[in-house]
């Protein structure tokens, strides 16, 4: 029997009826997906997997949803993207105000080049989760979450929800990345050593490995186990993780086997700062890391695994910055960052007016 069709003989006329399945439908079936409306409570961190699969971190629901966007056709290249007031456009589309329309994360679909945004309509626990998409021409549209193909996995060790701005539940999932059949998820648990890197197989099969991460925080002068990774990316089988105030840490992917491990702090990039997003790109023969921050601009670091491996681990109190070098680039108020194509990045930039703008740049 062919993978792409099956034959069913009619009971009375012996005519063969051929039913053909689209590649996307087959992919969804192979990924263990079902049709329906996912019960996402909060659309937080997002990342793309293969063939237009979008992973959505539901921080309130302590779950990851894999959504088949059906968006796998590469659009014509248009690196000049400039969408002014994307939050205002979204607010008008959903009958809200820009002040009550929160963009939680941004990710580029590498299969199509389209830009996806996870959004909250409203503030607080009753906010409605919505997904939006912007194409290369700047058109913004809502991504339907009704009667779509999806699968999900939940975490049973999430922190309890508490009132206030430091609700640990909202850090259940802080960042996520798919690579080679695995989804790595950063965040907090309800355990004593709360900081976790979880590794899930995709398609989801119930197999979850949760590793406690301890790091030495030079600016604070102590080992920490309850501060979550804020943003991370993988490079040559190594997790490059950044924490609040701003240690940069390396963690071998192969060490994420469920035990408690200590990451290697290779840099302190400055106190009173939250790292927001990371991308890796290549220019000439050199790889670079770009990292957006809320108080210290956009940093550029030369990536050299040999240098990182040889770097002295920071294990004593640091005033200012130390470790592997970086430069600060002249981009201000960048709140989200992703790689658009091999030569460009896309930024979500906050303006003093309250507008959030999507803007592409040539990778520096």
Image (cartoon, rainbow, N blue to C red):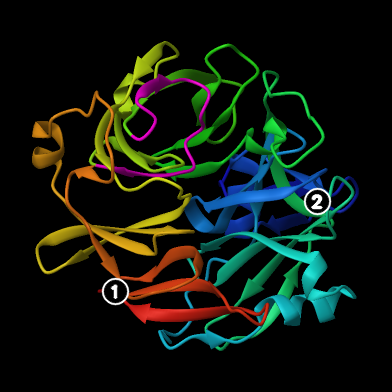
Report the disc number at residue 45.
none
Residue occupying the point 31% across, 31% down: 218
Q: In which quadrant of the rendered view does residue 83 lie? A: bottom right
Residue occupying the point 48% across, 81% down: 359
Looking at the picture, does residue 287 appear above or below residue 234?
below
Q: Residues within 10 Å of mark 2 (few under 14, many from 20)?
A: few
Q: Residues within 10 Å of mark 1 (few under 14, many from 20)?
A: some
Residue occupying the point 59% across, 31% down: 204
Whether the magenta-drawn stretch holds residue 228 is answered as: yes
Q: Is residue 213 left or right of residue 305?
A: right
**Which region is colored magenta?**
219-235
Asked which secondary structure carries label 1, the reply is loop
- Residue 238 visible from this viewpoint: yes
> Which sits earlier in the primary sequence, circle 2 or circle 1?
2
Q: Is residue 27 left or right of residue 59?
A: left
Asked which secondary structure carries label 2, the reply is loop
Q: Which residue is mark 1?
A: 363
- Residue 5 visible from this viewpoint: no
Q: CA distance from mark 2 to mark 1?
A: 62 Å
Q: Is residue 101 left or right of residue 364?
A: right
Report the disc number at residue 14.
2
Question: Which percent across, then down, holds residue 238?
Answer: 28, 35
């Amino acid at each position: 029997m062919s993978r792409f069709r099956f034959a069913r003989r009619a009971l009375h006329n012996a005519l063969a009826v051929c039913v053909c399945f689209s590649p996307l439908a087959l992919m969804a079936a192979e990924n263990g997906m079902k049709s329906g409306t996912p019960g996402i409570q909060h659309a937080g961190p997002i990342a793309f997997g293969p063939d237009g699969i979008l992973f959505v971190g539901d921080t309130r629901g302590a779950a990851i949803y894999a959504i088949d966007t059906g968006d796998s056709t590469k659009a014509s290249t248009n690196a000049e993207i400039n969408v002014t007031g994307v939050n205002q456009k979204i607010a008008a589309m959903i009958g809200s105000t820009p002040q009550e329309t929160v963009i939680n994360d941004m990710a580029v679909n590498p299969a199509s080049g389209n830009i996806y945004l996870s959004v909250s309509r409203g503030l607080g626990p009753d906010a409605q989760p919505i997904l939006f998409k912007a194409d290369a021409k700047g058109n913004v549209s809502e991504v339907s979450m009704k009667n779509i193909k999806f699968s999900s996995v939940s975490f049973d060790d999430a922190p309890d929800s508490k009132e206030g701005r430091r609700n640990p539940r909202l850090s259940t999932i802080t960042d996520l990345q798919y690579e080679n059949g695995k989804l790595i998820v950063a965040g907090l648990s309800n355990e004593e050593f709360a900081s976790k890197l979880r590794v899930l197989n995709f398609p989801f099969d119930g197999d979850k490995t949760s590793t406690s991460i301890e790091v030495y925080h030079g600016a604070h002068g102590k080992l920490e186990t309850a501060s979550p990774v804020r943003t991370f990316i993988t490079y040559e089988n190594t997790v490059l993780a950044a924490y609040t105030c701003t240690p940069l840490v390396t963690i071998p992917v192969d060490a994420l086997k469920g035990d408690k491990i200590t990451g290697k702090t290779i840099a302190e990039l400055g106190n009173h700062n939250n790292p927001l997003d990371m991308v890796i790109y290549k220019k000439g023969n050199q790889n670079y890391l770009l990292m957006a921050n809320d108080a210290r601009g956009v940093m550029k670091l030369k990536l050299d695994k040999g240098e990182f491996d040889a770097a002295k681990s920071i294990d004593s109190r640091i005033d200012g910055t130390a470790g592997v070098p970086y430069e600060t680039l002249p981009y201000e108020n960048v709140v989200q960052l992703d790689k658009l194509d091999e030569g460009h990045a896309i930024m979500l930039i906050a303006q003093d007016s309250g507008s959030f703008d999507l803007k592409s740049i040539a990778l520096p």
